[in-house]
Each structure stands twice: as C-alpha cells, then as structure tokens.
Amino acid sequence: MGTWGAGPFDSDGAGDLVASIRHGDFTFAGVEPYFEDDEYVEADGGQAALALVELTLAVHGAPHAPVLEEETVVPAFAAHLTPERTTWLLEQSDRVLSDPETSELYELWAETGEDEWLATARASVERLRALTAG
C-alpha cells in the first residue's frame, strides 16, 4: 500500500528519501537523475524535490513535520547542503510546480482537483527562496 497525501512527506518517495538520510545513504547525486530530462519531471522527482525543500527549511530552523523530529535526520541532511545545492533545489522545485504538462506530480494533483497541495508546496518554496535570498 502506497502513501499518498498533500503534505511534503505524504508519499513513498519522500519516505524513502528520509530513510536514506536516516541510514546515511543520502547523496544529492542519488536524486539528480530524477531531473536529467529537461522537459519532464516524473512523480518520484517531484516528491523528492518537495521533501528536500522541507528538509532545507528545517535546516534553516523553520518548523517542520513530525517525521523530521528524529534527532539525526536534519543534521545528517545539513551536512550535504550547500548554497549551490539550495539554488539547484529551488530550480527543480520550480519545474515541479510550474505546469502539469512538464511535471507528473503536478499533473496527478491537477486531476484530483485538490488545490491544497499546490498552495502548500508553493508556499514552502517561496519561504525557502526568501530565507536564502539574503
């Protein structure tokens, strides 16, 4: 049974991402292949991008989801984060949230008619953009 909800960690892809951080297996090189196609981002890539946005916000001290409450997850992820990675992450998140024609995750949510997902995801991306603009 898969996990599916409007929150950034309410997907199997996000759960797998957090597990990889928890177990010390995470690398940005491991998620980069999701974004190699310049024209389309599959759902797994979208799930990863939005979870990474929330993780990056948590590194910057923003309130975060209970799944990140474990003491090791946020510091372990922070060790991989650089300003360049944050910029890259914002670029990929913009792709995920721009159009159902170029993002499978956006397309799947558009089919449901649920607007909560898009509003929540865009708000998180904008919070991260504001935190890193200075």
Image (spheres, rainbow, N blue to C red):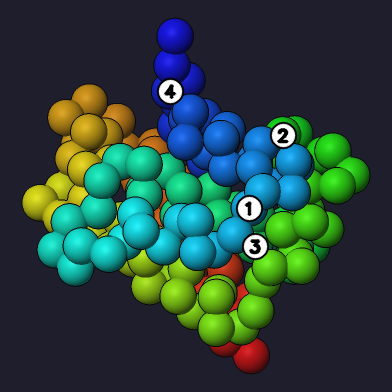
Quarter holding the N terminus is top left
Dot 4 amino acid type: Trp
Q: Position of residue 80 (x, y in %)?
A: 68, 68
Q: Secondary structure at mark 2?
A: helix
Q: What residue type is disc 3 on?
A: Thr
Residue position marked by numbered label 3 in the rendering: 56
In this figure, which residue is indicated by the disc labeled 2?
67
Q: Quadrant of residue 107?
A: top left
Q: Secondary structure at mark 4?
A: loop
Residue at image mark 4: 4
Which mark, residue 26?
A: 1
The quadrant of the rendering that contains the C terminus is bottom right
**Gap between marks 1 and 2, in whole Å?**
16 Å
Within-10-Å neighbours for mark 4: few <14, some 14–19, many 20+: few
> Circle 1 sits in a helix, a strand or a loop, which is it?
loop
Mark 4 → mark 3, Cα distance in angstroms? 22 Å
The residue sitting at 74% across, 49% down in the picture is 24
Report the residue at 43% width, 23% height from top.
4
Q: Answer with mark 4 or mark 1, whichever residue precedes in sequence.
A: 4
First in residue order: circle 1 vs circle 2: 1
In the picture as drawn, the residue positioned furthest to the left comes out as 101
Q: Name the N-terminal-most of marks 3 and 1.
A: 1
